[in-house]
Each structure stands twice: as C-alpha cells, then as structure tokens.
Image (spheres, grey):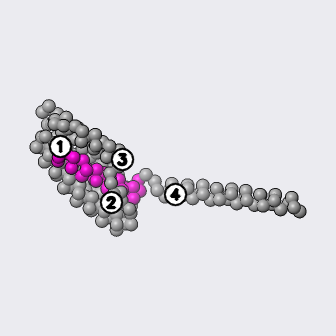
Amino acid sequence: MNRTLPKALRLAGLTALFALLACWTVLAGQTRRANPGNTDETFIRSAAEASMSQVDLAKVAEQRAQNPEVKKFAQLMSEEHSKLTEQLKQLGMAEGINLPTSVSRTDADAHRHLGTLNGPGFDKAYVQQVVSELERQNTEFKRGASTATKTNLKDFAERTLPTIESELQQAKQLSTRVSRQG
C-alpha cells in the first residue's frame, strides 16, 4: 500500500497537469479567435495610434521645416489630428476600449531620425513620412468603414475617411512641389 499511494498521487498530479494544459490550450485558442485582426478594437486602437503619430510628426515639422508650405501643412495636420485623437478617445471610453497613450516605438524612432535632418532634406523626408503614414491610415479607415460591427465606429470611420483622403492628396501634392524645389 505504501508504493500504491505515491503512484496514485503521481498519476493524479499528471492528470491534473494535462487537464490544465488542455484547458489553457482551449482558452488560448478562443482568445485568438475572439480578437481577429479586423476587430472594432483593433481599428480604434490603430486609428488612435496613427492620429497621435501624425500630431507628433507635425510638431517636429513645425519646429524644423524650412519651407513655409511644409510648416503650414504641419500645423494643419497637428490641428486636425489632435481633434481626431480626442474624438477617438471619446469613442474608446464609450466602448470601454483602452487606447494607446503614445506613438508606436517604430514611429517614434522614425520621428527622432527626422529630427536630425535640416533644411530641404528635412522637408522632403517629412512629407514622404506623412504620405506613408496617411496611406496606412487611409487603408485602416477604409477597413474600419467596411468591417466595423459597432455602428458608432463604422459611422466615425465613414465620416473621417474623406478627411484622411483629402490630407493624403494634399501631402502627395506637397511632396511633388517640395521635390522640385531642391
């Protein structure tokens, strides 16, 4: 009987461990399925991060840009995306979604690098970065407008998309002009 009890305890322990691992695997699988790449939460978090990135980038440009047109565009981006960020914060609170409070590390690194440039080189690099970020944001808002399941998020994406598209067009036109100048 002395030998049977330890074997029984070992067997019970292993059974419990395997049951725990099985439950964890099932729960982990459900979590992944519950958060697919195009969820409402993913859209609003991505939109907030992109908007904060535009504000951060614009602040760098307001200080470093040489071209008055670039400075003016940076001010516009800062104003519009500050408002957009506030609207997203309100939507996030209404939906119980915690939004990021700072730009991504990748964007912050890119903005820091831009801050090391001067003159026309900065202007060109800034406008190219804005075009790139707005293209990404435009794609996100199109996806949000077509796949959001919550009406207020879908409406927000649909209402905001024309603004993002307009900014993208302006940025592309500015990029062409800045490239010609130097």
The residue that mark 4 highlights is 31
Q: CA distance from mark 3 to mark 4?
A: 25 Å
**Amino acid at pointer 4:** Thr
Instruction: Determine which residue is flagged by label 2.
Output: 154
Q: Which residue is mark 1?
A: 64
The picture places residue 6, in percent across and down from the top left corner, at: 81, 59
The Cα atoms of the two marked residues, 3 and 2, are separated by 28 Å
**Nearest-to-viewer mark from 4 and 1:** 1
Q: Residues within 10 Å of mark 4 (few under 14, many from 20)?
A: few
| x and y, in percent, of residue 24 in the image | 60, 57
Magenta span: helix, strand or loop, mainly?
A: helix
Q: Is residue 158 left or right of residue 175?
A: right
Foreground mark, 1 or 2? 1
Quarter of the image where the N terminus is located: bottom right
Q: What is the number of the mark on residue 105?
A: 3
Q: Amino acid at mark 1?
A: Arg
Res. 101 in view = yes
Which residue is painted at 34% across and 68% down in the image? 94
4 or 1: tag closer to the N-terminus: 4
Q: Residue furthest bottom?
A: 94
Q: Which comes before the other along the chain, label 3 or label 4?
A: 4
Q: Is residue 7 left or right of residue 82?
A: right
Earlier in the chain: of badge 4 and badge 2, it is: 4
Quarter of the image where the C terminus is located: top left
